[in-house]
Amino acid sequence: MRPISQSVVKKDHEPKITGTSLYVGDYDNEGVLTGKFLRSKVARAKLISVKVPPLPEGYFYIDRNDVPGDNNVNIVMDDTPVYARETVEYIGEPIAMVAGPDGKKVDEILSSIEVTYEELTPVLDIRKSETVFFDYEFGKGDMEKAFAEADKIYTEEFTTGYQDQTYLETQGMMAVPEKDGKMFVHGSLQCAYYVHGAVMRALGCGPADVHILQDVTGGGFGGKEAFPSILGCQVAVAAKKANAPVRIIFDRREDLEFTSKRHPSLCTYKVAVKDGKVTAMDIDVKFNSGAYTTLSAVVLQRGIICANGIYNVENLHVRGRALKTNTTPTGAYRGFGAPQTFFAVEMMMDHIAKDLGEDSLEFKEKHLVKQGDGTSTSGIYHFPVPVPDMINEIDAVCDFRRKHKEYALPQTGRYRKGIGMSMYFHGAGFTGSGERDIIKAVCRLHKYPDGTVEILASNGEIGQGLRTTFPKIVAKELNLPLEKVYYNHPDTARVPDSGPTVASRSLMVVGELLRRCAIKLRESWIDGEDQIAEEHFKEPDFVIPFYLDKFQGDAYPTYAWGVNAIEVEIDTYTGLTKILGAYGSFDVGTPMDYNIVMGQMEGGFLQGIGYASMEYMDYDSKGRIRNNSFSDYLIPTAADVPNLKCMLHVEEYPDGPYGAKGAGELPLVGAPSAYVEAMEQALGGKVSLNHAPFTPEDTMKVIMKEGI
Ligand code: MTE
Ligand code: MOS
């Protein structure tokens, strides 16, 4: 490992540990109005009337008529309203806000408001949805020929459920009208400039009239990528009307029911096999977008690019659709569409191997991509693919190959064991030419006369360590002690737009930009002077341009790689599963800080295990999310997976800082298939499991049905 990987005390360690960090809920209440939403009680309706009683002094009712600019939130598309239009599209949709000095009084007012709806039949099930938000299609080779010549054709359907980000700090935003007429919005968020663009549009004002600050943020995991843009507009409109600061902070129930979560998926695979090898895949991917498009286009793009896994499939056809339902809009969650399709393809490969009487690991190994091979979108894997070595590393720590064969033999007794493996990648940065054409990141370094250097960028610390790793990179390049370089939470009034904190891009893309910026500053350094250096994104020369209309080219410049194994023991009396071990080998290039990266790997892997095994969330017959508390929606703790082992395999990326690649999302992606494969083996291997999460109830169903 390189010297930069040596761990340091995180820059925000002290205030977080001592409780002095200022979260949005910690600002003084003095003069701040508490806002709460009047939410739709039905999944789909025309709004006929809203009867608001006379309000006491100092209390405000805010709805779409108060939006000074455009009542559309600027996300990828603009169909999400700031406040509901003439219709409501899901249970919980904000129709209006009531704001006032006393939160209890606000509740009272809300309960006295009468809403009359003309109810329409909601569409809840994606299988019945006829509203296609996005529809993409791509492929290569000769599908007809491959299927005509196949020895065998396999068809199977896979489903995955919701997953909620369950950050420790719920969503919260605050808007403060400033003396000069500007609007200041701050809160818990990942992408200050996204909120900036959205609030500008809702208020109908110019870029200088609004500024956005990220407060200390208690985790985002994608959940604070687009949602704060909506909430930011809602509080800004309220603060404008009240001409006073307005803050809104969700309680956990509200957060679980009404904020974005991972898209449930339905994937159908049709696979041709000839001479023991996969020759073609015809894949249909459907994601449940909920009521508005929000980030579905980009989540779906990433999902379908990964749909053939890390296997060479010469003849490929992929179609992906994001469909509307009258449910809470879904959005970004660590992995961004990839966990869904990687689950499906890994299970598919496993099931084909089983049918062919082969060991699934050996079957997968026969199909693995390597450096120089073509990607699903006819790009190229430009860099080494270290997966075979990583498989061996996993095998060395958990004896995978032996156990995998042993557990496949008939088992008896109360406890049954299984082990499963997944292999996958995560492409860092925006999909396709997004970094070059849409984001166009800019960053600056400000050197003060006393020799301290401030990093000016718009990426947010959300627990992934940027306030430490960014300064480490800059300090190293400037040969300065780490104390001399600092990175504050971004305020759009002070920092350039270096893009959002998403897609595991900040460290790899912006980190490299900062490194280059530091070189510039070093080369022009004059002691005692106030200096600024600036850098702009430049795409590496080797990248094959990506065309979204054809879905062709390099979807990502490079990939982080993962191999996971999970070993389980099922108690056939209770249906409960004990995880005997979870092993992950991760290649995220050079770690910018060993402890931070290991924290990312362990945390992400555990989130993936939760997604695989216990994080069950569904809506009721009316379309309301039922699992709205931590007693109904279970997330894993360290105690659930005591034997979790993560290892780093370093394949340096020349265009990332000191060889670093995007790290944040990778570790979540492969857990579901490794877990469900293990469960399938422990359950005797005869039934093909095809959904995640696979809960104890699901286990019990198989036990009863199979007479285990
Ligand atoms: N780790 C912590 N502790 N908290 C988070 O909110 N978000 C994840 C991941 N790791 C997250 C996290 C997600 S969704 C992303 S996209 C990446 O961090 C962002 O990493 P980056 O800063 O390199 O872009
Ligand atoms: Mo991460 S899901 O891209 O915020």
Image: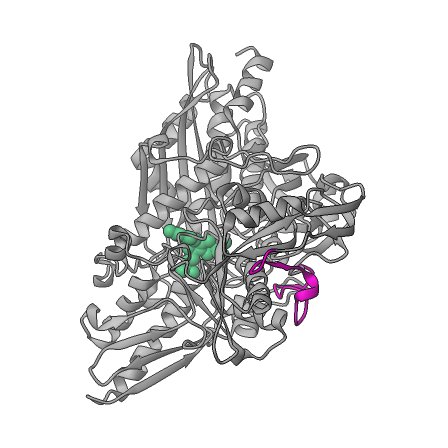
Q: Position of residue 398 (x, y in %)?
A: 32, 32
Q: Quadrant of the N terminus?
A: bottom left
Q: Position of residue 205 (x, y in %)?
A: 60, 77
Up the image or down, 551 lies above or below 399; here it is: below
Residue 66 seen = yes
**Residue located at (56% from left, 57% from top):** 99
Up the image or down, 702 lies above or below 507; here it is: above
Give residue 690's quadrant in the image.
Answer: top right
Q: Is residue 59 magenta?
A: yes
**Colour setting:** one colour
Give residue 686's quadrant in the image.
Answer: top right
Q: Main secondary structure of the magenta part?
A: loop
Up the image or down, 3 lies above or below 537; here it is: above
Q: Give the total of numbered labels.
A: 0
- Classify residue 558 as left or right of residue 518: right
**Residue located at (65% from left, 41% from top):** 267
| Depth check, front residue: 246 or 308 | 246
Q: Position of residue 92 (x, y in %)?
A: 64, 46
Residue 283 seen = no
- Classify residue 564 as left or right of residue 17: right
- Classify residue 286 as left or right of residue 517: right
Q: Position of residue 553 (x, y in %)?
A: 59, 65
Q: Is residue 432 magenta?
A: no
- Classify residue 198 as left or right of residue 502: right
| Depth check, front residue: 636 or 666 | 636
Question: In the rendered structure, which segment of residues is drawn in magenta?
Answer: 56-80
